[in-house]
Image (cartoon, rainbow, N blue to C red):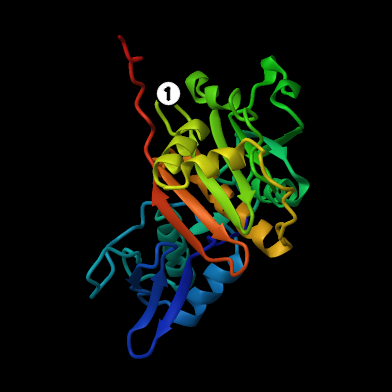
Amino acid sequence: MATARLAPGVALVTVPGQGLAVRTPDGEFLRVDTGTAAPDAVVERLTRGHGSSGDTAAQVPAQGSDSEGVGPTAPDAPDGELERLAAAFDGAGYLAHEGDGTRGPLAGRTVAVLGDDVLTEPLTRFVRAEGGEVRRAKRLTDLPDEQSPDVVVWCLDSPVPQGLWDEADRLPADGTGWLRCHREGTTAWLEPLAAAPGDVTSADVRLRRLAATPAHRELAAYWAGSCTDDTGPAHTAASAALTACLLTADLIAWAAGRGRARRLRRVDLRDLTVDEHTVLPVPAVAPLTR
């Protein structure tokens, strides 16, 4: 029979004077009524995994707990008691079976990654570690139409050249996710993920940033390339890993269907502090008439 052990994130806790409790992956503690089974035998059974439980109907409320737990239905021989406890844990979802395999939160999602290697390499590792399929490309036109990705992530270790992201800003209108980041001097800017018409695009972020600064003419000129060459400091391995982790977290939230946070985040590359500001799309307006 397949081996069944405690699932990842589940722990058994021996509480002095109280017996066993189970800590769930969400951090909740539930008392375990072990019946006639010795607590150490229960720990051995559920951590070493001998055989697999079959009857998953043996779930009963825990004794003396504020919340529902797992426990046996009635006293019996110790081996039968252990198996009923294992069945209760299995029914509650607290056991993992050998050969079950794991599916990461990005399983079944195709992520196209574009940009500079210092950022795209750690991002590629993280996405694959979470079960996603990665396609590397230099340009959007390198992605075949018949194999369009679920989301495009574009990472730059420099300011965004004028017009570079205009085409990508149209991706959400077609239902393709659009996530991006870039660096300006000692600041990395991470823009919110857009996945549907009306979501925040790169153009929206630029307009909001121009509206928020009295130096809007200077900032516009900087974006247009009317400045000296950017001599750094560029991303370090640590700042690139942090940036890639934040982007991966956005992808996981998107894949899980959680509401996309409309937040513009800034990473200070000097001390790796992160702050964020809410950003909204800019509504379309009719042209002025004379």
**Residue 52 in view of the camera:** yes
Q: Quadrant of residue 155?
A: top right
* Three-letter residue code for mark 1: Pro
* Residue at x 55%, y 58% (from the top left corner): 267
* Residue at x 34%, y 58% (from the top left corner): 59
* Residue at x 50%, y 56% (from the top left corner): 53
Q: Classify 61 as above or below 41.
A: above
Which of these two is toward me, 213 or 13? 213
Q: Residues within 10 Å of mark 1 (few under 14, many from 20)?
A: some
Which of these two is toward me, 24 or 164? 164
Q: How many marks?
A: 1
Q: Classify 22 as above or below 143.
A: below
Disc 1 secondary structure class: loop
109 vs 62, left or right, is right
281 vs 46, left or right, is left
Q: Classify 140 as above or below 129.
A: above
237 vs 261, left or right, is right
The single residue placed furthest to the top in the displayed view is: 290
The single residue placed furthest to the front in the displayed view is: 290
Relative image position of residue 164 (x, y in whole percent): 65, 30
**Residue 38 in view of the camera:** no
Relative image position of residue 162 (x, y in whole percent): 63, 31
* Residue at x 35%, y 64% (from the top left corner): 70
Relative image position of residue 207 (x, y in whole percent): 45, 35
Give the residue pinned by disc 1: 197
Which of these two is toward me, 186 or 191? 186
Q: Quadrant of residue 139?
A: top right
Q: Quadrant of the C terminus?
A: top left
